Amino acid sequence: MDAAAVRALALGLPEAEEYDHGGLPAFRVRGARFATMLDAGSRTVNLMLGEAGIREAAAAWPEHCSESWYAGRLNAARVDFAAIEPALMRELVTDAYRNRAPAALRRLLD
């Protein structure tokens, strides 16, 4: 999977939009960020899965996912999208979206 495929996954979700987050491409839904691509040459994306989801992803797929800390708190799962199976990447991006989207938009996915 490459950055363009991750971008397409994120933007394929209801009302998702891309914006600049400190010089990095990021994705949000109704103002809530759910994913941030790291630098342009990077193979990683930070997904806002919530604390339990972050820990679960890092434990289940340690070769592809790790915990990302910011300002002393656990804030995202860092995922190596170049090495992960596309179906799992789709699931993780969707989970991050669900974690941040309002209930009405989450229902559209069901």
Image: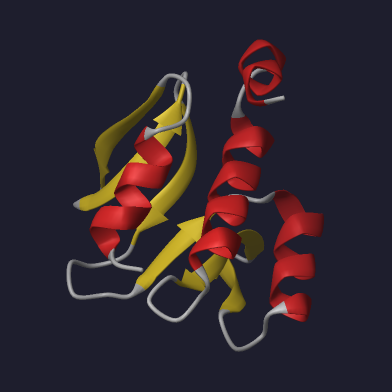
Q: Quadrant of the N terminus?
A: bottom left
Task: State the residue at coordinates (23%, 67%).
Answer: 39
Count the numbered circles shown. Answer: 0
Where residue 3 appears, x then y in whole percent? 27, 61
Task: State the residue at coordinates (81%, 57%).
Answer: 52
- Is 59 on the left-hand or right-hand side of 25? right
- Toward the viewer: 34 or 110? 110
Where residue 36 appears, x then y in whole percent? 39, 52
Quadrant in which residue 109 is drawn = top right
Residue 11 visible: yes
Q: Quadrant of the C terminus?
A: top right
Where residue 44 appears, x then y in whole percent? 39, 71
Residue lying furthest top: 104
Task: State the residue at coordinates (77%, 79%).
Answer: 59
**Eyeballing the image, is 53 above or below 64?**
above
Where residue 82 appears, x then y in whole percent? 38, 76
- Is 39 on the left-hand or right-hand side of 58? left
Residue 71 visible: no
